[in-house]
Image (cartoon, rainbow, N blue to C red):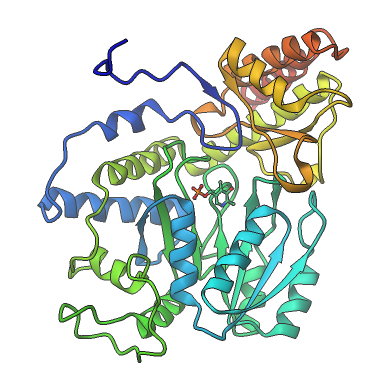
Amino acid sequence: MTITAPLDPPARLLMGPGPISAYPRVLRAMSAQLVGQYDPFMTATMRETQELYRRVWATRNDATLLVDGTARAGIEAALMSLIRPGDRVLVPVFGRFGHLLAEIAERALAEVHVVEVPWGHVVPTSLIEEAVARVKPAVLALVQGDTSTTMNQPLDEIGAICERHGALFYTDATASLGGNAFLADAWGVDAATAGLQKCLGGPSGSAPLTLSERAVSVIRSRSRVEAGIREDADASAADFVRTNYFDLGMILDYWGPRRLNHHTEATSMLYAARECAAVLLEEGREAVIERHRLAGAAMLAGVRGLGLGVFGDVAHRMNNVVAVEVPDGVPADAVREALLDDFGVEIGTSFGPLHGRVWRIGTMGYNARKDAVLVTLAALEAVLRRFGVAVAAGGGVEAAGDVFRAAVREEVLA
Ligand SMILES: *Cc1c(COP(=O)(O)O)cnc(C)c1O
């Protein structure tokens, strides 16, 4: 091979907790030609993308846009822009990403309060309410789906709790959006962020974000004048957002009617984000969630059909990822390597207390499909057998197949 050979990644089926194989339509959109930052097509595509994401988030929020960067960029933009130094911020933690929110809030110079539950559980709503009443935070920061544990935190009552106690409600929906219910307005969410590489079926590198009017007014009051360009900001020197790239006030003005220059929108990622939303909405929000539910239920039944255990409170599992217990004495990483080498199938490892104890298998976006589920289970069975595990022959494919067949029967009857 010469160094000028075209890029040629290996064929992979990405069945981990993200990133996952992208929808072909998204990849095609990313190869479309660039236009200038103020080209009418650019502005129209930004407007269209905002409107598409209002429908994805189920919101009427005018302030619905993209932050250029991975999901973490969206989180950082939201928290750095919303939190004033010295603000109390409450973070209920049920996995790795809760710790990330707490860490970023600390960098924003918040007084951070954490309530934590053991991994594998969600935080009881009553515990959150009690903590909000006690701490009286300016911001409650809560993950929806935490891929580190596969748990899906119920959010439907959290907005009302925050409203009663005068807190802003921020949530990280990166792993859950598009594969599990999310209703920004109905749930009273003030700020939510995501990424493309989970259920939305795109590459990482763009962070969809939506902000309520309450959130926008806090952000506006803290946005800064940039040397002679913006003259409308009223933030005092002590209060302005301590980041330029992630100053959501500036990003809002770039996306807003004034189109004030800030960064150069990552055009190919805009195309990708636009296409992810279009794919989702064309299938229908409910239908996409149902497809994730079905693929996830089939994967869960399949791993159990192989005789493997599942980690955590399964009743609160996200639709799109299952944590499979590694059988005693089996080298977790060697199994993953064999799956990749022999079958081109990638599944996920785990962090912190779960490292070496569970594999995380995702069924999201383009890969929330019957063939992807069955191929993964067949490959896992073959590899486990080679490592000496007495798995039930054909048990995974059979049990998962039953779930898909039952769904087809239900559809025929309906
Ligand atoms: C995957 C994930 C992220 C990822 O952030 P990136 O910056 O895109 O890597 C953030 N939050 C949650 C809850 C996730 O599951």
Location of residue 229 in the rendering, given as x and y in whole percent from the top left corner: 16, 77
Instruction: Tell me which corner region of the image, top left, top right, bottom left or bottom right, holds residue 138.
Output: bottom right
Location of residue 370 in the rendering, given as x and y in whole percent from the top left corner: 60, 20
Q: Nearer the viewer, residue 330 or 123?
A: 330
Q: Nearer the viewer, residue 407 or 250?
A: 250
Location of residue 283 in the rendering, given as x and y in whole percent from the top left corner: 44, 35
Instruction: Tell me which corner region of the image, top left, top right, bottom left or bottom right, holds residue 368.
Output: top right
User: Which residue sits at x=67%, y=53%?
Assistant: 96
Q: Would you say 106 lies left or right of 311 here?
A: left
User: Which residue sits at x=43%, y=65%?
Assistant: 77
Location of residue 275 in the rendering, given as x and y in whole percent from the top left corner: 34, 39
Position of residue 97 relative to residue 157, above or below, is above
User: Which residue sits at x=17%, y=70%?
Assistant: 258
Position of residue 10 relative to residue 260, above or below, is above
The outermost residue toward the front is 2
Q: Would you say 357 lies left or right of 202 here?
A: right
Position of residue 361 relative to residue 259, above or below, is above
Q: Nearer the viewer, residue 217 or 77?
A: 77
Q: Would you say 295 lies left or right of 60 here?
A: right
User: Which residue sits at x=42%, y=29%?
Assistant: 23
Q: Would you say 68 lies left or right of 183 here?
A: left
Q: Quadrant of the N terminus?
A: top left
Q: Give the total number of marks visible in the rendering.
A: 0
Position of residue 166 relative to residue 379, above or below, is below
Q: Quadrant of the C terminus?
A: top right
Q: Nearer the viewer, residue 50 or 119?
A: 119
